[in-house]
């Protein structure tokens, strides 16, 4: 990660242990990544995971 001005920028792919951990890094606090992360069509990570498991 690099600091560019007042922003932090990922300069390479970063693997996180969970969607919530990734969200916490991005927003700087607790977040439920399963319902916050969405696709361009508006489907949540939780919806995608539920469909994959059914």
Image (cartoon, rainbow, N blue to C red):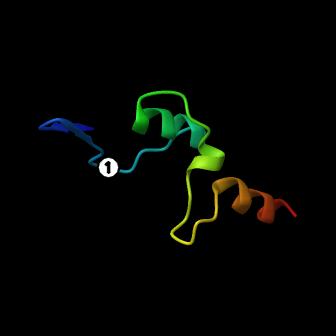
Pick whichever, 36 or 1, lies toward us: 36
Name which residue lies at 55% across and 52% down. Answer: 37
| Position of residue 44 measured from the top left corner of the image (x, y, whole percent) | 64, 58
Which quarter of the rendering shows the C terminus?
bottom right
Q: Is residue 50 above or below residue 30?
A: below
Check the image and name the residue furthest to the top. Answer: 29
Name which residue lies at 58% across and 48% down. Answer: 36
Q: Quadrant of residue 38?
A: bottom right
| Position of residue 1 measured from the top left corner of the image (x, y, whole percent) | 27, 38
Pick whichever, 7 or 54, lies toward us: 7
Residue under label 1, please give it: 12
**Label 1: few (<14), some (14–19) or many (≥20) C-alpha neighbours in 10 Å:** few
Name which residue lies at 42% across and 45% down. Answer: 14
| Position of residue 27 measured from the top left corner of the image (x, y, whole percent) | 42, 36
Q: Secondary structure at mark 1?
A: loop
The image shows a total of numbered marks equal to 1
Q: Is residue 40 above or below residue 2?
A: below
Q: Is residue 48 above or below residue 20?
A: below
> Seen in the image, is 4 located left or right of residue 12?
left
Check the image and name the residue furthest to the bottom. Answer: 41
């Amino acid at each position: 990660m690099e600091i560019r001005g007042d922003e932090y920028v990922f300069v390479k792919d970063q693997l996180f242990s969970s969607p919530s951990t990734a969200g916490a890094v991005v927003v700087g606090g607790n977040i439920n990544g399963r319902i916050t992360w969405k696709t361009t069509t508006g489907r949540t990570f939780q919806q995608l995971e539920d469909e994959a498991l059914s």
